[in-house]
Image (tube, rainbow, N blue to C red):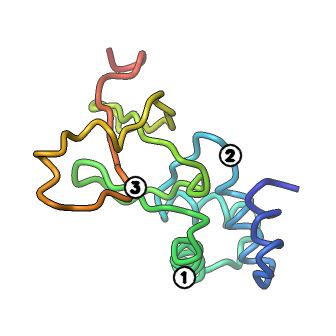
């Protein structure tokens, strides 16, 4: 069983065949699919699955915190099934491919006190950009 499916079962999430196939499509380390890509892959496994069901399921997974939405440079939102583990993203400026990266050090500590404007920091999001080997 996939890591995502295990986590969802552990939460008591009702596992219909449609929800299961969406979770299976999303499972993996560097998976960042658009909703349309999720639908196409899910429909290949379960032809009767509707686009609305895929969108609704993705929305539920985001609300649960099991999947996060990643938006880059005005491109379609992508869905990241690794929302449960801290990481940042490396995005290709050419083709838009996304990889999960885990920089070392405390990223919260990197913002000097005078730049916090009195905020109490709780999270940080960093997106690294560059060209992947195929686009370079």
Question: Which of marks 3 and 2 precedes in the sequence?
Answer: 2
- Tag of residue 56: 1
- Tag of residue 34: none
Q: Residues within 10 Å of mark 2 (few under 14, many from 20)?
A: some
Q: Does residue 81 appear left or right of residue 111 in this picture?
A: right
For the point 68% across and 57% down, the residue is: 25
For the point 44% across and 38% down, the residue is: 98
Q: Does residue 73 appear left or right of residue 133 in this picture?
A: left
Please determine whether, in this image, residue 130 is positioned above or below residue 58: above
Mark 2 — residue?
A: 28
Q: Secondary structure at mark 2?
A: loop
Query: Total number of numbered labels?
Result: 3
Quarter of the image where the N terminus is located? bottom right
Mark 3 — residue?
A: 70
Q: Quadrant of residue 90?
A: top left
Between the residue at mark 3 and the residue at mark 1, the CA separation in whole angstroms equals 17 Å
Q: Does residue 107 appear left or right of residue 73 in this picture?
A: right
Q: Secondary structure at mark 1?
A: helix
Please determine whether, in this image, residue 67 is positioned above or below residue 33: below
For the point 81% across and 54% down, the residue is: 2
Please determine whether, in this image, residue 18 is positioned above or below residue 35: below
Relative image position of residue 83 (x, y in whole percent): 56, 57
């Amino acid at each position: 069983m996939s890591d995502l499916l295990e986590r969802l079962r552990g939460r008591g999430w009702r596992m219909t065949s449609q929800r299961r196939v969406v979770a299976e499509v999303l499972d993996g380390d560097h998976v960042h699919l658009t909703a349309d890509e999720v639908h196409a892959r899910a429909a290949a496994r379960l032809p009767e699955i509707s686009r609305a069901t895929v969108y609704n399921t993705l929305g539920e997974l985001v609300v649960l915190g099991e999947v996060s939405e990643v938006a880059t440079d005005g491109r379609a939102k992508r869905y990241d099934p690794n929302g449960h583990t801290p990481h940042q993203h490396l995005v290709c400026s050419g083709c838009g491919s996304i990889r999960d990266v885990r920089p070392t050090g405390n990223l919260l500590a990197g913002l000097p006190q005078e730049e916090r404007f009195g905020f109490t920091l709780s999270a940080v999001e960093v997106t690294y950009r560059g060209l992947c080997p195929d686009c370079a």
